[in-house]
Amino acid sequence: GDVDYSCGNIDFPGDVYIEGSVQSDFSVQAHGSIAVRGQIENGAFIKAAADLIVGGGITGNDTRITCGGKTQTCYIHSATLHCQGPLEVGSYIIKADIRCGATIVVHTRGGSRSGLVVGGRTVAADGLEARFVGSANGTFTELSLGVDPAIADKLLQCRKQQENCKRQRERY
C-alpha cells in the first residue's frame, strides 16, 4: 500500500518496493534501490543509495529526492531531485530543480506536455535529450549542460553570497 500513517516512515538497509504512493510529509530511505508503483507526493523525502523507479510521477514544491544511481519516472513537477546516474522521464519536467550527474532523457510519450523541460533549474553533466526546452510565455528556465552538479551548486552558492555582499554594501 501507500507510505502513510498506517506504516510510517521507512528506513531500510536493502531494497524497498512500495505498491502504492509515498504520501505527503513521509520519508523513504534505503541503502539499496527504491521502487514506487504509484507516485511521490508533495513534501515527501526519498533517499536511495542505488536506483529509484517511480511508476507514476514526482510532484510538489517541498518534495526532496536523492538517488545514487539511475532514476526513472513518468513526470516531475515542482520537485527537487538530485541523482548521480542517468535520469529518464516519460513525459515532462516542469518547474523542477534537477541535478543529474549523467544524461537526462525526457521522452515524448503523448500528451500536450510531452518532451518538455519548462521552468526551474536543470543541470546535467552529460547532456539533455528533450523535444522542447524553455517557454515562449516567459517562464524562466535555467539549463546547464556539461557541468558537474556539485560544481554548479557551489557556483550558485557563490552567486548568492555575492548578491548578499552587494546588498550589504549598498546599505552603507
Image (cartoon, rainbow, N blue to C red):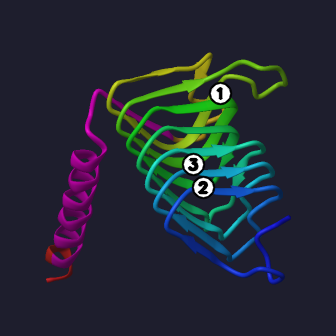
Q: How far is the residue under mark 1 from the one under mark 3?
A: 12 Å
Callout 1: helix, strand or loop? strand
Q: Is residue 33 above or below residue 172?
A: above
Q: Disc 1 marks which residue? A: 116
Number of dots carrying numbers? 3
In the picture, measured across the screen, residue 37 lies left or right of residue 160, that is: right
- Count residues near mark 2 (Cα–Cα under 10 Å), then give few for <14, some for 14-19, many for 20+: many
Q: Residue 96's mark?
A: 3
- Count residues near mark 1 (Cα–Cα under 10 Å), then give few for <14, some for 14-19, many for 20+: many
Q: Nearer the viewer, mark 2 or mark 1?
A: 2
> What segment carries the magenta color?
141-168
What amino acid does circle 1 point to? Leu
Q: Residue 69's mark?
A: none
Q: In which quarter of the image is the C terminus?
A: bottom left
What amino acid does circle 2 point to? Ala
Q: Residue at x 41, y 49 (%)?
A: 68
What amino acid does circle 3 point to? Ala
Where residue 168 sits, quadrant-wise, is bottom left
| 1 or 3: tag closer to the N-terminus | 3
Q: Is residue 59 above or below residue 63?
A: above
Q: Quadrant of the N terminus?
A: bottom right
Q: Is residue 63 above or below residue 155?
A: below
Callout 3: helix, strand or loop? strand
Nearer to the camera, 101 or 120: 101
Disc 2, disc 3: CB below 8 Å? yes
Q: Where is residue 101 in the image (x, y as percent from the top left)?
A: 35, 38
| 2 or 3: tag closer to the N-terminus | 2
In the picture, measured across the screen, residue 97 lies left or right of residue 68, that is: right
Q: Residue at x 43, y 55 (%)?
A: 49
